[in-house]
Image (spheres, rainbow, N blue to C red):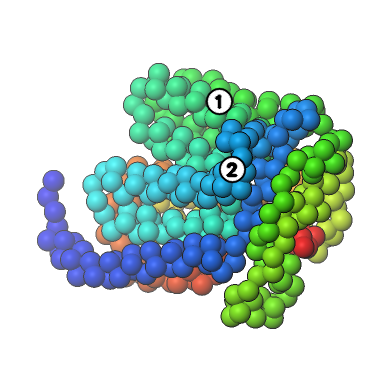
Amino acid sequence: MTVNPSLSANRLTRQPLYIGIAVAIAAWATAVLWFGIKIFPLDVYWMSYYSADYAHGFVRRGLAGELVDLVPGHYFGVTLTLRWLSTAVYLCGLATVAGMVLFSRHRSERRLMVAMLIPLLPFGVPFAAFSARPDLFGGAALALFSSALAFARSRAIAMGCCAAYGVATAALTLVHEAIGLEFALGAVLAIIVLGGALETTQRLGITVAVAPGVITAAVVAAFGRHDVAAQLCAAVPHHSMPNPLATITSVRTLLHYVVAGQPSQTDYHDWVCRNVMPNYDNGIMDAIRTVGHIGAGGLIASLMFGVVAIVVTMRAVSGISGVPLRAFVEELRGQRVWVTAGLLLIIPVFLTGIDWTRWLTIVAFDVAVVFILFSGQRPEIAQQPTPKVLRLFILLVTALALFPVGVIPGFGGPRMI
C-alpha cells in the first residue's frame, strides 16, 4: 500500500492536537464519574432497582434482588457493587465498539475522531454515570453483540452470537422488564447491517436474538404480581445514605449544593418504601395513567429533547466518519418490516414509562452503535479529513462536553424525596 507523503505529514502535524484532545476527554470523563461518586451520588436511587426479589412470588425485576441475595448479609455492599458494575460493563461495551472502529482496519484520522467522540455522545459517559439502571447491562450486551457480528466470518459463529444474545437479553429482562424491548431495534439493525455472515438466515437470526427478550417481557407483564408492595418493603433493610434528591429543588439549590457539597441523609428503607415500592402494586393501566399525568408539556419537551439527541448523534457520526446516512439506510432496504417491528417494540416502553428523553437516548444508542460499526467498514472513513471536518470535530467535542444530554431522563416527572 502506497502512503501519500503529504497525508503522513498532516497526521504528524496534527498528532499533538489529537493527544491534547484525548487527554481533555479523559479528564472530562474522570470529572463526570467523580461528580457522580463524590458530589452528586444518586446511589440511593440506583440501588433501589435491586430491592425486589422472588421471596413473595414472581415480580418484575425480581432477578435483580435475587442477585443481591446470593451474598447473604452484605446487602448494601453487593447492591452498590451491582450499581457500579452496570456502569463499568456498559463503558467496556462502548470501548469495544470504539476499538472495533479504531483497530479493525488501516488507521486513519477519521477512525480516531469517531472513536474519541463516542464517550461524549448522549449515550456516552454521562449516561453511564447518571443513568446507572440495569438497562446498562442490556446496552453492553447489544454493543458486544453488534461488535461480534461485525467480526464474525462464519454463519455458525454469527448464529451462535444471536442465540447467546437472546439468552442474555431474556435473563436481563427479568432484572429490568424493559430491556427486551429497549434494545430490540438495535439487535434487528445489527443483524441486517452487520450480519452478512448469516447470509440467507438473517430472519432466523433476528428471531433467535430478539424473541426471547420480547417473550420474557410479555411474561413479566402478564404474570408479574401487583399486590406485594408491603411485603417487599418490609424486606428492605435500614441504612443511612446521602440523598441529593431531597436537597435540590431548583437550579439555585443545585448550585448551592455543588458549592456546599453537603447532601442530606435519608434512610434507605424509608426512601425505597416511599418512592419505589408503591409502583409494584400498579398494573399496566396504572403505569399508562402515570405517564398521562405528566401532561402534554413535559412529554413534548422530553420528546423534542430526545429527538434532538438522536439527530445530533447521527449527524455527528456521519459528518466525522464521512459515511452518508443514506448509505446506512440503503442497507435496510428490503427489510423494512423487521425494522418497523423493532421500532414498534419500544412503544410500550414510552406508554408505561415517563422518561421519554431516556428512551430516545437508548434509541440513539441502538441506531448509532450499529452505524458506527458500519462506518468502520466503509471506505469513506479512510479518507483524509478536510479542515472543515476537523473544525466540526473540535466543535462537537466542546459542545457535547459542555452539554451532556445523557444526564437528563425527561421533564415533568414526579419529584423523589
**Number of the label disc, if any, that sits on residue 402:** none
Q: Amino acid at mark 1?
A: Val
* Above or below 236: residue 386: below
* Image x and y of residue 317, in percent: 44, 56
Of callouts 1 and 2, the N-terminal one: 2
Q: Is residue 320 left or right of residue 360?
A: left
* Above or below 106: residue 206: above
**Gap in Å between the C-alphas at discs 1 and 2?**
28 Å
* Image x and y of residue 405, in percent: 58, 63
Q: Is residue 366 visible?
A: no
> In this figure, which residue is indicated by the disc labeled 2?
74
* Image x and y of residue 386, in percent: 31, 66
Q: Give the SS element for disc 1.
A: helix
Depth check, front residue: 330 or 283: 283
Q: Give the SS element for disc 2.
A: loop
* Image x and y of residue 31, in percent: 46, 68
The residue lying at 82 percent from left, 31 percent from top is: 225
The residue lying at 80 percent from left, 60 percent from top is: 414
Q: Residues within 10 Å of mark 1 (few under 14, many from 20)?
A: some
Q: Residues within 10 Å of mark 2 (few under 14, many from 20)?
A: few
> In this figure, which residue is indicated by the disc labeled 1?
167
The residue lying at 78 percent from left, 30 percent from top is: 56
Depth check, front residue: 216 or 41: 41
Q: Amino acid at mark 2?
A: His
* Above or below 380: residue 390: below
Depth check, front residue: 384 or 251: 251
Q: Quadrant of the C terminus?
A: bottom right
Q: Is residue 188 left or right of residue 4?
A: right
**Which quadrant of the figure has residue 346?**
top right
The residue lying at 76 percent from left, 60 percent from top is: 416
Q: Is residue 118 visible?
A: yes
Q: Is residue 399 left or right of residue 255?
A: left
